[in-house]
Amino acid sequence: MLRDVSRAAEQLKKKGFEPDLICAHPGWGEPLFLKAIWPDTPLLCYQEFFYNEHGFDSNFDPEFQEERGWYSQAKLLMKNAYLHLTLDQADWNVSPTHFQASSFPEHYRRRISVIHDGVDVQRAVPNPTPAPLELPDGTLLNHGQQIVTFVNRRLEPYRGCHTFLRSIPELQKLCPEARIVIVGETTASVTALFVRRVNGKIVFWRRLRGNTIHPVFISRASCPMSSSSRCCNSVPATCISPIPL
């Protein structure tokens, strides 16, 4: 991808194209060589996160503490390598939240503006009369029903899935009629903690702090992206809903 972007930019340069401003997300290294092609064009980078050894997303959960030897630190250093390169080249940077901006070292933070991504409040509003939503296992979610949701790209301890799963017995005690819907791709770490296969179906069935979760069926769901997205397709996800005993 990095070479493809650079080659495409070089072709544009040969055709006489000179941008007034380059706005880029450095997540996959795309803007690394753009300054070599257009050295006089300002480069604005969207800086999402800087990896840290302490205080952020590394080694924060006591349940998953690991020995922090040189190899663990080396992995963090390598994850930040491309960020150092783009931060050094960028004329200015943008982060969407103060929290994300605070993850960067102080000398970089001086060249970061915090600008929220923004929400279209005319479009991002509840539907006053939503139609029932049928989950792949046949469960219907209806307007006015008590529904608890947990949504993540990936169900893993890094994103707090295990903490949410352990709260389910208490949620069921407080709201016995509520439906619990979890959306996300399953991972080996969660499977090892909570999942086993019964009659060809994957269910959660673990004792959690003295309580037992109801069986929970996991199925595949199609989650279309919003019509405003440039790429409109179906994203594999996992929907989980309680099954009555």
Image: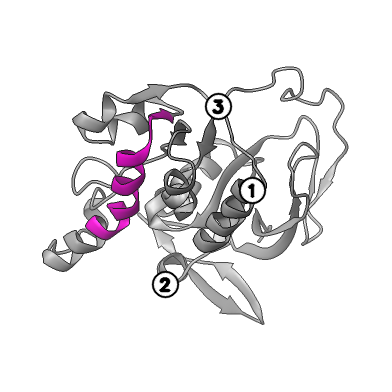
Front in this rendered view, residue 221 or 93:
93
- Tell me the distance, in whole angstroms, between the alpha carbons under discs 1 and 3: 29 Å
Name the quarter where the N terminus is drawn.
Answer: bottom right
Which amino acid, mark 3?
Asp
Q: What SS does tag 3 mark? A: loop
Q: Is residue 175 magenta?
A: no
Q: Which residues are magenta?
A: 77-94
Residue denoted by label 2: 192
Residue 48 visible in this rendered orientation of the protein: yes
Residue 183 visible in this rendered orientation of the protein: no
Q: What SS does tag 1 mark? A: helix
Q: Is residue 80 magenta?
A: yes
- Tell me the distance, in whole angstroms, between the alpha carbons under discs 1 and 2: 50 Å
Decide which of tag 1 and tag 3 comes sooner along the chain.
Answer: 1
Q: Nearer the viewer, mark 2 or mark 3?
A: 3
Whether residue 232 sits left or right of residue 156 in the image: it is right
Q: Is residue 123 above or below residue 217?
A: above
Residue denoted by label 3: 117
Residue denoted by label 1: 12
Whether residue 219 sits left or right of residue 157 in the image: it is right
